[in-house]
Image (cartoon, helix red, strand yellow):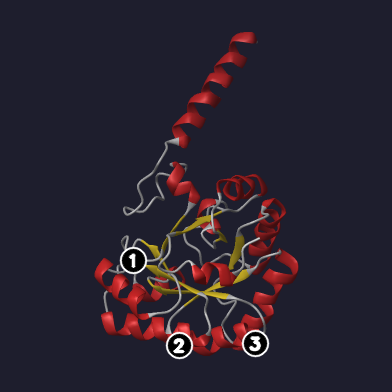
Amino acid sequence: MQTVQDIKKLKGRRKISVLTAYDYWTSIILDEIGVDLVLVGDSLGMVMLGYKNTLPVSMDEMIHHTKAVARGTKNAIIVGDMPFISDISARDAVINAGRFIKEGGAGAVKIEGGEKFKEIVKAVVDNGIPVMGHIGLTPQDVLVLGGYKRQDDRQRLLDDALSIQEAGAFSLVIECVPEEIAAEITEKVNVPTISCGSGNRCDGQVAVMHDVLGLCPQLTPKFIKPHAEIKNNIVNALTKWKNDISKKS
């Protein structure tokens, strides 16, 4: 099984692959193809549970799905996504991050937020739990941001990245940031950067598996190119089954 130290050593050597999983069978597939990190994202709120955004997702829901993913993952590092308000204080963050490790079977957690979350990230790391940082567009701030908007404040983003690195994060997701800024951050930090809609010059890429497979086209962001149209295949197959059944009755 890979460790966070293995991931850190990949910086500058090869691209790091990160995909989401929310269930047992998906995690088996991702592990089989050799994905480096499996993210149990709070995106499950929209993809799996039908919420309009990630804000309603609870810790219990995250733990439930993380446990399922852990049962099917043998080699990749499982990263549990800390849901909205679960890391409102350092104490809350440590307790909830600990649940991901002890109950969920994760190997790390992801915490959204920049410089203002430095002490929270540090507290979690100091308690023996690896943290993946997340800066740029932070979906849990969607109400404050007024929507899912591209972030381009270069100095703030640089300060956020350096602060989260200093706090001890082993990697850093950069979401919806201009490619030039994401590339500059990648050069200035010592930990791997993972692009989420921030161009191809980071150390790796993360995507929601359903977006890559074309399972939820209505939710797929513009920066993702679907590599399949699985939804259409499912609709066609189930329609054929339904018609076959109808003919037999």
Give the residue number, with chain letter if any, for mark 3. Answer: 91
Alpha-carbon span between mark 2 and mark 1: 19 Å
Could you tell me the amino acid type at mark 1? Cys
- In the rendered image, which quarter contains the N terminus? bottom right
Residue 5 x, y percent position in the rendering: 57, 72
**Which residue is denoted by mark 2 in the rendering?**
116
Q: Name the residue that disc number 1 marks.
A: 176
- Nearer-the-camera pick, 189 or 89: 189
Identify the image quadrant of residue 192. Answer: bottom left
Answer whether residue 151 is visible to the viewer in this image: no
For residue 157, above or below residue 53: below
Residue 51 is tagged as none
Residue 106 visible somewhere in the drawing? yes
Question: Residue flagged by tag 3: what amino acid is it?
Answer: Arg
Q: Are marks 2 and 3 in contact (CB under 8 Å)?
A: no
**Callout 3: SS:** helix
Q: Taking 109 as reference, is 95 left or right?
A: right
Amino acid on which the number 2 mark rests in the picture? Lys
User: Horizontal and vertical percent for residue 237?
Assistant: 53, 25
Write the residue at 68% across / 64% down: 63
> Disc 1 and disc 3: Cα gap in Å?
30 Å
